[in-house]
Image: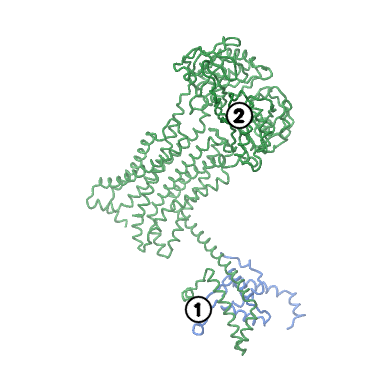
């Protein structure tokens, strides 16, 4: 039995740690044993027998020892945990007390953080719902989108014909199921005919997505036979809006384009494929003998264990076998293997969100920069308080608090602050996301999946904690980084001198640098958007209303019967007051639809040997179309009513096409034809090129044909009106209804809306990025002002003395300003460096703006630098008024 | 952590004996067994394994506390762990005593001891 070294006993500190616990137990047990032996010896029992007896009475000593050790260790662990929890609780109480003592600081800091964290969480909800959250279908990782590609024909992404679809469905073993779908408009008959957006799909559509109906059942392969499939599956929204959610809807018969169709099922609310505005799903009635007509989008479910790459290889083989059998497709002597013929198999999720991925990631990065500025801002505020707290901390140190303990206390305070900011931020994010998704200002894929869900909240908590630690570092530096000083007065005086100043300098530079980076990047995007908005589209959408006028299929069985209707309708509409001009067009600009075809110019070489074929965008119009959209005719004439069936087949081409063959645009009188057609069309006019697919990409070659020679029932009326467009539109609708009552007239939209819609993603990027940059600049300006004020008030004594010994106030002002300017220069230079990196990264979001745009890279940084210097002026003037007496008395 | 003394009632007999033994003086483990041995007229003999488990549990519950000290520095200098009653322990012991008193004061107990008791 050894004696333990003195100090532990003296202080009666229980020994902790495994070793200590063991020794305690051993001591206690051996003492017990020794006492018993002694007692036996006292009774006269010989030593050996006494020992043996004592041990025997004791029982299994090692088992007892183990049991006691376990109990003690458990107890020690619990005690440590309780101690720790107690101290955390104490820290929290103390932190809350401290924060309540300075309410202004607390409110400003929490608000600043709430804005930063709220914006970060809101954008993360978009990233989470759109990019991260798996699609709401069974085993979404097995789902792929499917298309074909024939680059030589300009068909980068080529949809499927019915024959194509059947051959993949039946021939590709790599898919568990395979379906096609095509968007169509159908007219729901009744007293007030209504245009519905339906998706015609092949039988395995619901099987591919693996979603069970909410009511009734879905259709399957049996419905893939033409004309045995008069059934419909409703979406949840349509069921709600048209049947009030009645459960007996199954069995109801709808009049769709004059045909009776029976409702067999309703899909659940979450089902929104391929788009959320779909109202009804109808079986396509697949006809595998239909070789032409490539209008089907493809979606498939991979068989278990099959990779996207394997499916791509297998389907490409099938595709090429099919192409080899298509003399129309391949020029003589060319085998498919020598062409770029391939299938496009892509994971469905990335295919859906591909266009918004980059903008969303850029926004997330931007908002994180803004958050960093907010954090720097709060750190500045903290530094401001550190001066006052140096004394308190020194006192606590003198009373025996270790540096770690004080540090933990300060960190707790920062984290409490951050959590408060996080809670407020989460609330802001929740409101923001709700308003944003409900507002409909932008249409994003999967917007329905965007919400503040547990994952977003977890992210918010994590971000808040990270912020707390980040801005908690500044006071930590002040308090703990330096050697604790026992001189409380000196601690107070020097509390925020050298070390603190370094921290503050870093904060100024960081805030300025980050905001310069963000502002320049936002500036580039804003400039791009301005360029986009001001892009000359080649037509003027303002004042034009597009009214979709699908003709009832039953009545207008042949396309030709549509022609008299258009003539009557135009005569009536043009005579209405307020109507300046009107025309029918097959494909409205920016409607998302586009028809393309291969073409030949008379006298020019036929398609080259590799099968490469020039593509042209085709559209069908009535006379007056160019005038209605303000598309200038550069050469020749518009179509007239004299261009009709039986007269000379004519066409109007656009500048882009004309310029390629006739640089002087003298195309009138030349002839061209579509490769799939033998009729030569005579060019009667050259129109200005229009951008009708995407604002950012230059127009492809276009050709227009008159409706009388290329009849179609798929029509939209475009009306240019003077004055009140709404009143005119109402009159137009009444007039059209007077001529043909079977036309649903609910598809009325200003043409500008189509264009706006095409800029949605870019507009969102622009608005949000601009807002973040503005917030960042405001925060940074406030932060820099704060730091400089702090800098001045910390040096009040020094300035006072300087002036007492004869320094001019202007000299003091210069001193402060030069310090500010030096910091501003460093910050701006670093920020421009950051912006150079950022601009390369956002290159794909820019339009008509160089990634090193001189305007953005000079004006904005200089402006921000000037703002930074300006925020030093007030503090500098305050410095010049430093009174040495006041300064010294403050000691 | 102010625990409610009532939550410990009823005590197990051994625990009550330990608290009673510590009511007047601080004792080390061995002395405690002697005390209990004496008080119960040899009826309760605590094995060391059992004794220390009971002690540790009582310490964990906060009814007793262990202290290190030398019994009599001039006699021996060995470090021992002494146990003493805490305030909470004292209140719990008192509550338990009251409980037993009420129980023992009942008529049934009195008639039982009158008819079958040894005294």
Q: Colour of chain A?
A: green
Number of residues whose C-alpha sits closer than 10 Å to that of mark 1, classed few (under 14), some (14–19) or many (20 or more): few
In this rendering, the answer to whether B28 lies above or below A772 is below
- What is the chain letter for disc 1? A
Residue A18 tag number: none
Can the viewer see residue A452 in this picture? yes
Residue located farthest toward the left when viewing the structure as drawn:
A806
Please, is residue A566 above or below residue A844 in the view? above
Q: Position of residue A406 (x, y in %)?
A: 44, 60
Q: Nearer the viewer, residue B25 or A149?
A: A149
The front one of A517 and A102 is: A517
Position of the N terminus of chain B, as image quadrant, is: bottom right
Lateral position of residue A732 relative to residue A405, left or right: right
What tint does the image give chain B?
Answer: blue
Q: Nearer the viewer, mark 2 or mark 1?
A: 2
Residue with the mark numbered 1? A3
Figure quadrant of the C terminus of chain B: bottom right
Give the farthest residue toward the front: A333
> What is the chain identity of the residue bearing mark 2?
A
Looking at the picture, tell me which residue is in the foreground, A253 or A889: A253
- What secondary structure is found at the residue carrying circle 1? loop
Residue A327, image x, y percentages:
62, 24
Would you identify the image quadrant in which residue A546 lies? top right
Query: Could you tell whether A781 is left or right of A550 in the image?
Result: left
Give coordinates of residue A12: x percent, y percent.
50, 73
Label 2, label 1: how far apart the Cα atoms are: 90 Å
Q: Is residue A650 above or below residue A248?
A: above
Q: Earlier in the sequence, mark 2 or mark 1?
A: 1
Residue at mark 2: A159
Q: Which of the 4 image quadrants contains residue A213? A: top right
Residue at image location 60% in from the left, 84% down from the top: A37
């Amino acid at each position: 039995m050894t004696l333990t070294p003195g100090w532990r006993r003296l202080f009666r500190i229980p020994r902790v740690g495994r070793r200590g616990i063991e020794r305690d137990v051993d001591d206690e047990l051996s003492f017990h044993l020794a006492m018993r032996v002694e007692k036996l010896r006292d009774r006269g029992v010989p030593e050996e027998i006494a020992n043996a007896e004592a041990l025997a009475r004791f029982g299994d000593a090692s088992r007892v020892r183990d049991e006691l050790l376990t109990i003690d260790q458990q107890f020690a662990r619990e005690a440590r945990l309780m101690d720790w929890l107690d101290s955390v609780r104490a820290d929290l109480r103390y932190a809350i007390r401290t924060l309540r003592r300075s309410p202004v600081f607390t409110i400003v800091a929490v608000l600043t953080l709430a804005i930063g964290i709220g914006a970060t969480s809101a954008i993360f909800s978009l990233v989470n719902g759109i990019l991260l959250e798996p699609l709401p279908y069974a085993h979404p990782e097995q789902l792929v989108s499917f298309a074909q590609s024939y680059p030589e024909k300009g068909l980068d992404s080529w949809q499927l014909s019915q024959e194509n679809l059947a051959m993949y469905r039946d021939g590709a073993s790599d898919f568990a199921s395979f379906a096609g779908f095509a968007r169509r408009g159908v007219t729901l008959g009744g007293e007030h005919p209504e245009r519905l957006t339906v998706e015609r799909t092949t039988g395995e559509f619901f099987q591919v997505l693996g979603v069970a109906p909410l009511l009734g059942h879905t259709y399957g392969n049996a419905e893939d036979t033409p004309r045995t499939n008069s059934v419909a599956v409703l979406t949840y929204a349509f069921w709600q809006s048209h049947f009030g959610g009645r459960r007996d809807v199954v069995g109801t018969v709808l009049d769709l384009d004059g045909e009776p169709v029976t409702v067999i099922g309703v899909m659940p609310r979450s089902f929104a494929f391929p788009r959320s505005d779909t109202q009804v799903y109808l079986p396509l009635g697949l006809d595998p003998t239909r070789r032409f007509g490539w209008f089907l989008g493809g979606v498939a479910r991979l068989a278990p264990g099959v990779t996207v790459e394997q499916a791509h290889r297998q389907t490409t083989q099938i595709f090429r076998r099919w192409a080899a059998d298509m003399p129309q497709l391949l020029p003589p002597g060319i085998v498919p293997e020598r062409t770029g013929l391939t299938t496009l198999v892509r994971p469905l999720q990335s295919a859906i969100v591909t266009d918004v991925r980059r903008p969303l990631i850029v926004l997330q990065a931007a908002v994180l920069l803004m958050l960093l500025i907010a954090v720097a801002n709060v750190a500045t505020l903290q530094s401001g308080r550190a001066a006052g707290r140096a004394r308190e901390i020194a006192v606590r140190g003198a009373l025996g608090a270790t540096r770690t303990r004080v540090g933990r206390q300060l960190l707790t305070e920062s984290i409490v602050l951050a959590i408060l900011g996080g809670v407020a931020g989460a609330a802001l994010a929740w409101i923001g996301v709700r308003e944003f998704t409900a507002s409909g200002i932008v249409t994003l894929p999967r917007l329905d999946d965007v919400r503040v869900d547990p994952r977003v909240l977890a992210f918010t908590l994590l971000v808040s904690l990270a912020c707390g630690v980040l801005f908690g570092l500044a006071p930590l530096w002040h308090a703990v980084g330096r050697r604790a000083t026992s001189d409380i007065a000196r601690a107070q005086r020097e509390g925020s001198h050298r070390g603190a100043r370094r921290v503050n300098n870093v904060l100024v530079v960081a805030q300025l640098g980050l905001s310069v980076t963000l502002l320049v990047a936002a500036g580039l995007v804003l400039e791009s958007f301005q360029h986009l908005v001001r892009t000359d589209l080649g037509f003027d959408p303002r004042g034009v209303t597009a009214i979709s006028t699908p003709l009832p299929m039953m009545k207008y069985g042949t396309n030709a019967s549509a022609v008299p209707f258009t003539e009557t309708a135009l005569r009536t509409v043009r005579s209405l007051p307020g109507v300046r001009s009107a025309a029918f067009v097959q494909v409205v600009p920016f409607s998302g639809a586009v028809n393309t075809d291969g073409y030949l110019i008379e006298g020019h070489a036929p398609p080259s040997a590799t099968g490469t074929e020039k593509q042209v965008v085709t559209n069908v119009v009535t006379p007056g179309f160019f005038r209605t959209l303000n598309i200038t005719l550069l050469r020749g004439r518009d179509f007239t009513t004299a261009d009709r069936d039986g007269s000379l087949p004519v066409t109007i081409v656009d500048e882009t096409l004309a310029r390629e063959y006739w640089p002087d645009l003298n195309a009138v009188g030349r002839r061209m034809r579509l490769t799939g057609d033998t009729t030569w069309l005579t060019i009667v006019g050259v129109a200005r090129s229009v951008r009708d697919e995407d604002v950012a990409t230059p127009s492809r070659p276009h050709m227009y044909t008159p409706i009388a020679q290329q009849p179609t029932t798929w029509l939209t009326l475009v009306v240019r009106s003077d004055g009140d467009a709404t009143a005119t539109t109402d009159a137009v609708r009444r007039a059209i209804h007077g001529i043909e009552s079977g036309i649903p007239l609910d598809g009325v939209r200003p043409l500008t809306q189509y264009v706006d819609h095409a800029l949605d993603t870019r507009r969102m990027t622009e608005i949000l990025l601009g807002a973040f940059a503005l917030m960042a600049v405001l925060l940074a300006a406030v932060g820099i002002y704060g730091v400089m004020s702090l800098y001045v008030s910390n040096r009040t004594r020094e300035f006072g003395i300087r002036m007492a010994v004869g320094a001019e106030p202007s000299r003091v002002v210069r001193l402060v300003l030069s310090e500010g300017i030096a910091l501003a220069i460093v910050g701006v230079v670093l920020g421009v460096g950051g912006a150079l990196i950022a601009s390369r990264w956002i290159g794909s979001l820019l339009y008509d703006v160089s990634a090193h745009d001189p305007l953005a890279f000079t004006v904005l940084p200089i402006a921000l630098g000037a703002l930074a210097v300006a925020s030093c002026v007030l503090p500098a003037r305050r410095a010049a008024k430093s009174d040495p007496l006041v300064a010294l008395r403050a000691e | 952590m102010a625990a409610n003394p009532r939550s410990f009632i009823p005590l197990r007999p051994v625990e009550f004996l330990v608290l009673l033994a510590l009511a007047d003086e601080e004792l080390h483990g061995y002395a405690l067994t002697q005390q209990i041995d004496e008080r119960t007229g040899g009826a309760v003999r605590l094995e060391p394994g059992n004794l220390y488990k009971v002690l540790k549990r009582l310490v964990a519950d906060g009814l007793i506390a262990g202290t290190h000290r030398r019994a009599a520095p001039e006699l021996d200098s060995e470090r021992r762990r002494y146990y003493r009653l805490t305030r909470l322990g004292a209140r719990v012991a008192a509550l338990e005593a009251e409980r037993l008193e009420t129980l023992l004061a009942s008529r049934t107990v009195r008639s039982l001891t009158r008819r079958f008791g040894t005294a």
